[in-house]
Image (cartoon, rainbow, N blue to C red):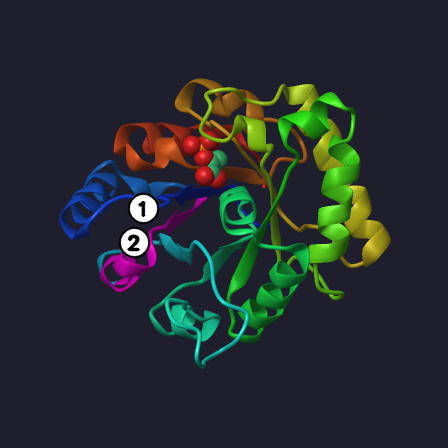
Amino acid sequence: MATPPIIAGNWKMNLLLESSTKLISDLKKGGISKSRARVIVIPPATLLSSIADQIKNTGIFLGAQNCHEELKGAFTGEVSAEMLASVGCNYVILGHSERRTLFGETNAQIKAKMSSAIKCGLTPIVCVGENLRQREAGGAMDTVGKQLEECLIDKVSKDNCIIAYEPIWAIGTGQTAEPDDIEEIHSHIRNTLKAKEPNTDGIPILYGGSVKPENASKILVLPDVGGVLVGGASLNPKDFLAIIDKTSGKSE
Ligand code: PEP
């Protein structure tokens, strides 16, 4: 069966017990369970258990923002994929640009994390995207192609992988990529996936970067956009619900 449009909300390092409970309660009151989209909330690690309890029987899925490549051991401060699965996560973001640029995460590490996540039953949401310098130099396609080559395990398929194209210059800046640019890169991602492994049809490719209720429709309508990864706007229940609502016209 085709995957429904995916709307994933990356809360980043925001919210506490009380404020996150209020957000989930507002999303439930706003009718999130009735949506035909696959909604994924991605809180910080401290809130995963609590949110897992709060979203039981709502149809909302749970994701984490990162994992370590090893399953256990002397890695102070880290959280493994097995630990995430044990508290109810279904998804994990890997290689978010903030992890790459602020914490020096490499493509090789992301690939190791991907293997570990899949082994533990999580679906990785692997982020790729160029920075402004690379875009202005005409290197967006090459950057994204290299990231895919080096981050993805060999046997990727729609059952074990979601890709998120997130141009770094669009994250948290209020600037969004133009529909033509999104289409061009998504089609490049699709072709790169196919060249790597024939069985990649149906891998959802999300767009991320300042998605808001005002621009979500024109992004979600694009043929090879399988959904959106939303940062800032996912912290506001009204905005997040409005973005989810824009999927009502999108075919699976
Ligand atoms: C993100 O964090 O993945 C993101 C896309 O953030 P924002 O929507 O705030 O640009």
Magenta residues (range) = 37-52
Q: Is residue 28 left or right of residue 37?
A: left
Q: Secondary structure at mark 2?
A: loop
The disc at residue 177 is none
Pointer 2: what residue?
Answer: 58
Furthest-bottom residue in this view: 73
Residue name at image x 40 percent, y 23 percent: 213
- Tell me: 235 left or right of 214: left
Q: Which residue is located at x 42 percent, y 24 percent? A: 212
Q: Position of residue 171 (x, y in %)?
A: 50, 31
Q: Is residue 108 visible?
A: yes
Q: Would you say the residues marked 2 and 1 are in contact, meaning their CB atoms lie under 8 Å apart?
A: yes
The residue beneath circle 1 is: 33
| Quadrant (top left/top right/bottom left/bottom right) for the N terminus | bottom right
Q: Identify the residue shown where x is 30% and y is 36%.
A: 235
- Dot 1 falls on a residue whose secondary structure is helix
